[in-house]
Amino acid sequence: MLTSLGLDYTLLVVSAGSGLLGLVSGVLGVFAVLRKQSLLGDAVAHAALPGIALMFLLTQTRQTELLLLGATLTGVLATGTIIAIDRFSRIKYDSALALILSVFFGFGLVLITFIQKIPTANQAGLDKFIFGQASTMLVRDVRLMIWVTLLMLGLTVLFWKELKMFSFDPGFTEVAGFSTRRINALLSGMIVVAIMIGLQTVGVILMSALIVAPGAAARQWSDRLSVVALLAGFFGAVSGLIGTLISSSITKMPTGPTIVIVLSLFTLISLLLAPNRGLLWQHLRQRKNQQMISYDKVLTAIHELAMNHENHQHTHAMAMIQPSKNIAGKPSKALQAAVENLEQRGLVRRNEDNQVAITPEGIRHVNRHLVKGDE
Amino acid sequence: MSAQGEILLIAIIVSTACTIPGMFLVLRSMAMMSDAITHTILLGIVAAFFIVHSLTSPFLILGAALMGLLTVFMVESITKTKLMAEDSAIGIVFPFLFSIAIILITRYAGSVHLDTDSVLLGELAFAPFNRFVFLGVDMGAKAIYVMGAVLLMNLLLAFVFFKELKIATFDPALAAVLGLAPTLVHYGLMAAVSITAVAAFETVGSILVVAFMVGPPVTAYLLTDDLKRMMLISFAVGALNAFLGFRMAIWLDVSIAGSMATLTGITFFMVFLIAPSRGMLSVFLRRRRQKVDFAEKSLLFHLHNHEGDPDEALENGRHTIYDHLHWPHDFLDRLVKRLIDHHHVVVENDILKLTDQGRAYAIQSYEQIVAGIQVKEK
């Protein structure tokens, strides 16, 4: 039916798969980003390679489900090893990640080259997991992804409270009577599974971006975990879809990298434009603050001049407030703007000769906000 | 020299050259930066290739090194905005740059003799095919000279800037005060990482460069506290991994670099398990000993607190003490037995009584703990 609308069947399958993948990795990635474990995904993805090769060696099949089961096992093993190294030695977390990542990947290479030497084994298709090959996705792969996605999202909703508490305050979670070890195991396990279903599409090397980028981008838009998780799922799914569509409409455009670039753009836009947190907003806020401070400085100068006179309403020329560099003695634009702003706020008034005096309201404002202590 | 001898020699040179910057990455908690850089240099190579149209030009190394620095710069710029933690920034920047490289390679695959497999996976076995011929004389594999030059550069840098590296690594604030320019040291180190990675990726592949950079130093880190000794142990561990990995690869006829990385993991785990005082086994035993020791002291304090109390018979009773401490029965029984064996405690009328020795030990331990807390508070 949809094919009659001009949509290619394979493309439909592949985009559905990529979208689902983006959705589930985006939602789960939020917790990885909050727990400062963004790079665990990278290590786990690399660790999948020996699992795929071992499973192939043992079963001689290329059935995706079985290979991914093998990948899951080595992924979990790698995670456990990293946690053990972190806990039982002084080696830091990042060193443990880098070590396990490269060692597991190296072992995977050993196994793959070993398989290549077996004359009977048809290993073609194993290395698709290194870079990912979305076009090889079958309907049954997508069906598997649907079930996995539903399961992961279901678990997330079911353990929402625990995951939320654990992400922000593991100490409190422990004290409140929850087993942080179990929650951590659940979360790591879910992330491992999300990575496994992504291997086929984007491959082991780029998978970490799918975990990290949606969460990091969504984080900029809200301080509410539920909103961040929904947005991350949305960013992930949309990037998966757009990336697949772009790569299918341009020849020689690999899917995985295209998805990653779309995601990176989402992240960049979020970093720049997200309200309140975004860099653009930060910049505007800072400029406004600087402006307010400069206005205050002018007001204090006027106040000081006024205090030198019996009559506080005495007017002063602009040049008295801030000597001008201009030869004609015209006040600088900044000063003019500051005085105009202060006048609008009723803190100073000007006479027809453009001379300035502070108003009683201005004196009150200075005493209330700008003078330290009572002199 | 035989092809096998050359391969082994190249492997040992690569491992030693990688270890030097790798060690400082490990100590500065920047190990994952090596993972990022080894990926993004691919973009540097591709970009330089499009400019000079040659795969052997030294500009490729320059392009790769610049890309490595750009990676570090991008990660740091993002981290500086405080909108995202450093690990997230790494996890976004390197896949982004790497994706651009892959897309470029795929789109121009016809005209570029560069395939992603060889860059990422490398093949040490092919290294001897690429000869260095000088005035018509075969001088040996080219990789020996390329990696040898990188090794010399790293050794020289580490030797000349040892003091700067050491202080900037362990106390960046002090380094800044002393005028040692920690930022410059930082970027210098990153440049060394990039150059080493780009020179090594051809032979061992970019992902396994990480194993060579991080593996030997973390293994050595479990064995010593001395920076110079750590470097020497790293060299030895790296050479051992290269040698054993090479033998294994020949024996099983598999990827040489892969089996060297596997061996890196195996030696690490042996050391991780049994290293004296810092290995998992000794950490585990020490933590258990400390737990028993602390429990013993707490029990002695409890006995001391209730000595001579009217309800001493209840609080310190042989059979009622369980209700007051809420510790597992068998654990408490073992503790009491130990204390009796050490003559710290005796049982009189079913009441646990401190001996003079036990009381003195309890008071002494208590004073030590309090003194420790006071020192900490200061």
Image: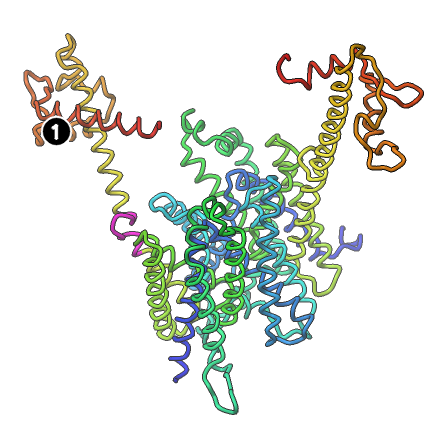
Q: In the image, A124: left or right of A102?
A: right
Of A58 and A75, nearer the camera is: A75
Say which quadrant the C terminus of chain B sits in.
top left
Residue B68 in the image: above or below residue A279: below
The amino acid type found where label 1 is placed reads: Leu
Residue at the spot 19% in from the left edge and 27% down from the top edge:
B365
Residue A356: x, y in percent?
Answer: 85, 20
Q: Is residue A50 visible to the viewer in this orientation of the structure?
A: no
10 Å crowding of disc 1: few (<14), some (14-19), many (20+): some
- Residue placed furthest toward the left: B348
Residue A232 spot, x, y in % from top left: 63, 40
Which one is nearer the viewer's eye here, B248 or B83? B83
Range of residues picked out in magenta: B270-281
- The residue nearer to you, when weighing B115 against B38, is B38
Dividing the picture into quadrants, the one containing residue A175 is top left
Q: Is residue B273 magenta?
A: yes
